[in-house]
Amino acid sequence: VQISKDLLRSQPLLKLLDDELLAQVMAHSRYMNVPKRTMLMMKGAGDDWLGSCSTAIQVVDMLHNGREVGLNIIRPGSFFGELSCIDRRPRSATLVAMTPCHLIQVPARSHGSCFSAPPRSPRR
């Protein structure tokens, strides 16, 4: 599946990137299919950024007794995980695919320079 500039620009943090920086992000991004109940992001880790193309994602945390508690639902079409990529702080929760899921993965290596470089004028 081809990842388009329009799809990436639907994410608020990417929509103002110029074509050169967006092409850099697009070149490293990949499309993934994952089965139901796949842990997409683990609490504490903070490298990649994901976008759900096809299904809702459940945000969960583990209690001290090992039970999983649902905290939130991320709707299809949403990107998530960007805060830990930008501020390099640990993630506060784990994300789990509720059904088989189609995702876009944006690796940290592709967007790190986008947010560490001086801002450019917004594209027109």
Image (cartoon, rainbow, N blue to C red):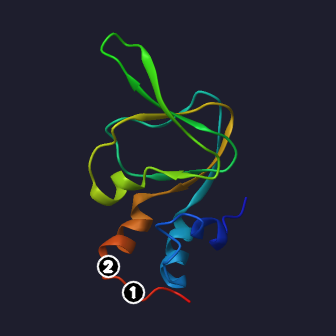
Query: Which residue, given by chain and number where applicable, does mark 2 sit on?
Result: 117
The residue lying toward the viewer, choosing from 111 and 78, is 78
Q: In which quarter of the image is residue 98?
A: top right
In what element is the residue under mark 2?
A: loop
For label 2, the crowd category at 10 Å Cα-Cα, with few meaning under 14, some 14 to 19 and many 20 or more, is few
Q: How far apart are marks 2 and 1 (CA)?
A: 9 Å
Q: In this view, does 42 lie to the left or right of 17?
A: left
Q: Which amino acid does label 2 sit on?
A: Ala
Does 103 sit above or below residue 99?
below
Q: Give the residue at x 42% y 33%.
A: 94
Does 9 sit above or below residue 121?
above
Q: In this view, does 90 lie to the left or right of 60?
A: left
The residue lying toward the viewer, choosing from 71 and 90, is 71
The disc placed on residue 98 is none
In what element is the residue under mark 1?
A: loop
- Contact (Cβ within 8 Å) of mark 2 with mark 1: yes
Does 59 sit above or below residue 103?
above
Query: Which residue, given by chain and number where applicable, does mark 1 sit on?
Result: 120
Quarter of the image with the C terminus is bottom right
Quarter of the image with the N terminus is bottom right
Q: Give the residue at x 44% y 21%.
A: 69
At which x and y percent is residue 10?
A: 60, 66
For label 1, the crowd category at 10 Å Cα-Cα, with few meaning under 14, some 14 to 19 and many 20 or more, is few
Q: Nearer the viewer, mark 2 or mark 1?
A: 1
